[in-house]
Image (tube, grey):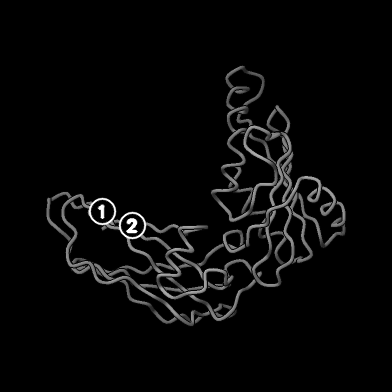
Amino acid sequence: LYASVRYLRKSSKKRELMLMGFDPNSTSVICLQMKFENRRTDGRGIRRIRLLQRSVKSNGAVPTTRVVLPQEIDILGSSQVSYVTIGLEFAQSSDKDGALFARFDVKCDRSSTSIDIRPPLAELVKSNQMKVSDFDISILKLHGIHQRSSSSFNLSSSGGSSSSDVNVSKKLKELPSKIIKASNLSFVGNNKSSKDYNKLRFAGFLPGNGLELLVEIKCKDTGAGEITVCCDSAMALNSILAYLKSSVL
């Protein structure tokens, strides 16, 4: 049995949470889609696939207050795939990365395994639709040592060759979609045709205190670049920066 999990966002998240009776606008509520796949090589089915929540004992972890789990899957035939949805409400939202924590057992007639759910802070931020001019004004105000954190990166794996230049250009154009896929940040700009790939802007709101979160990515055609994260929460700065940098590279 193979299982994978992804976070639902925007209209899909709103629709599923409303069906389960959750407030889709709450920053302490998340929605997961889990994929089950039968990868047995003997052609047989897998029976009684179910999720059971386990108690969590971890210092600083925010526990769940309500969980809606899917019904048991009686049988998953050979090579078949099934999708289920999980709704989780936590005791409170938090600006600490990995603070929200839930644990489940995935059981079937063949085995049992545990999975941990720790949504990254970048997944929990609320989207923030901004104009480029408003973004540029706001980011200039966040210039203090505890309001801004930056890190350099390089998209080039080798230097000087034409194949390397093509590879860097491709990676440069993939940056916006990579950030949007890895986080719940909003792209700041008009539309895809107007993107300046050498300077990208993203915005959001922290889930705990609602403070504005601004991200600026500058990258030269050579592949050398810098990510800058700005907000009034020192606790959130470094975790967001490290997460986004790993997403870019």
Q: Position of residue 139 (x, y in %)?
A: 82, 52
Q: Position of residue 186 (x, y in %)?
A: 64, 51
- Mark 2 Cα shell of 10 Å, populated few (<14), some (14-19), many (≥20): some
Helix, strand or loop at label 2? It is strand
Helix, strand or loop at label 1? It is strand
User: Is mark 1 in CB contact (under 8 Å) with mark 2?
Assistant: yes
The residue under label 2 is which amino acid type?
A: Lys
Q: Residue at x 50, y 68 (%)?
A: 30
The disc at residue 219 is none
Quadrant for the N terminus, please: bottom left
Question: How many numbered dots are placed on residues in this image?
Answer: 2
Residue, disc 1: 81
Residue 51 location, quadrant: bottom left
Residue 99 location, quadrant: bottom right
- Mark 1 Cα shell of 10 Å, populated few (<14), some (14-19), many (≥20): some
Q: Residue at x 39, y 60 (%)?
A: 33
Residue 196 location, quadrant: top right
Q: Residue at x 74, y 39 (%)?
A: 218
Return the disc, 1 or 2, that comes first in the chain's sequence: 2
Mark 1 and mark 2: Cα distance apart in space: 7 Å
On the picture, is 79 further left or further right than 220? left
User: Height in image: 73 above or below 12?
Assistant: below
On the picture, is 11 further left or further right than 190? left
Q: Nearer the viewer, residue 73 or 100?
A: 73
Q: Position of residue 120 (x, y in %)?
A: 57, 62
On the picture, is 80 further left or further right than 146? left
Residue, disc 2: 35
Quadrant for the C terminus, please: top right
The residue under label 1 is which amino acid type?
A: Val
On the picture, is 216 further left or further right than 49? right
Q: Residue at x 61, y 59 (%)?
A: 122
